[in-house]
Image: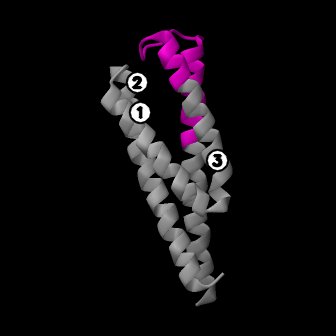
Amino acid sequence: MSASQARALDAVAFQLAATLDAYDVTFDALMRAWPDMDLYHRASASMDELKMYSAAVPQLSVPYVALLISHAELVHCLWKNGSGTAEPGDPLERARHDHRLAITSLRRKCLQLLAENAQARETDR
């Protein structure tokens, strides 16, 4: 991979990480304010951006798909539950836990990719 291609992938991975952070904050707010349609649409728009960024970086596509699935399952539970509050052990709580794990996994993979690329650039110098 050329240096310019590596920098472009880094830029995309950085944008993905920033969008993921914004999505995380928005979804936390959505959980507290369910069913706030403005927050719901913002979270959905963030998912669309994450899809675009992850499509450009193949190493991030699998953790993105895991996030997409957990997002869909959590939203389904929210619609079914009618509120963002959950009792211990109920499906909404489990879906929220899985969603958090998916966010963490994608974030970790993204940051790992950035660190590996930075290390490779240092080695090439």
Q: How many marks?
A: 3
**Is 64 covered by the magenta stretch?**
no
Viewer-proximal residue, 72 or 17? Answer: 72
Is residue 112 visible from the viewing direction of this image?
no
Q: Earlier in the sequence, mark 3 or mark 1?
A: 1
Secondary structure beneath label 1: helix
At mark 2, the secondary structure is helix
3D distance between C-alphas at marks 3 and 2? 22 Å
- Check disc 1 and give the amino acid type: Phe
Considering depth in this image, is 94 or 115 the residue closer to the camera? 94
Q: Which mark is residue 31?
A: 2
User: Residue under circle 3?
Assistant: 63
Magenta region's main secondary structure?
Answer: helix
Mark identifier at residue 60: none
Number of residues whose C-alpha sits closer than 10 Å to that of mark 3, classed few (under 14), some (14–19) or many (20 or more)? many
User: What type is the residue that disc 2 sits on?
Assistant: Met
Q: Indicate the position of residue 78 as horizontal and vertical percent values.
A: 48, 18
Query: Could you tell me how far apart the alpha carbons at marks 1 and 2 are, in whole angstroms?
Result: 6 Å
> What residue is at 52 percent from the left and 77 percent from the top?
7
**In contact (CB < 8 Å): disc 3 and disc 1:** no
Nearer-the-camera pick, 116 or 41: 41
Tell whether 125 sits left or right of 43: right
Give the image quarter of residue 105: top right
Region rendered in magenta: 75-103
Q: Which residue is mark 1?
A: 27
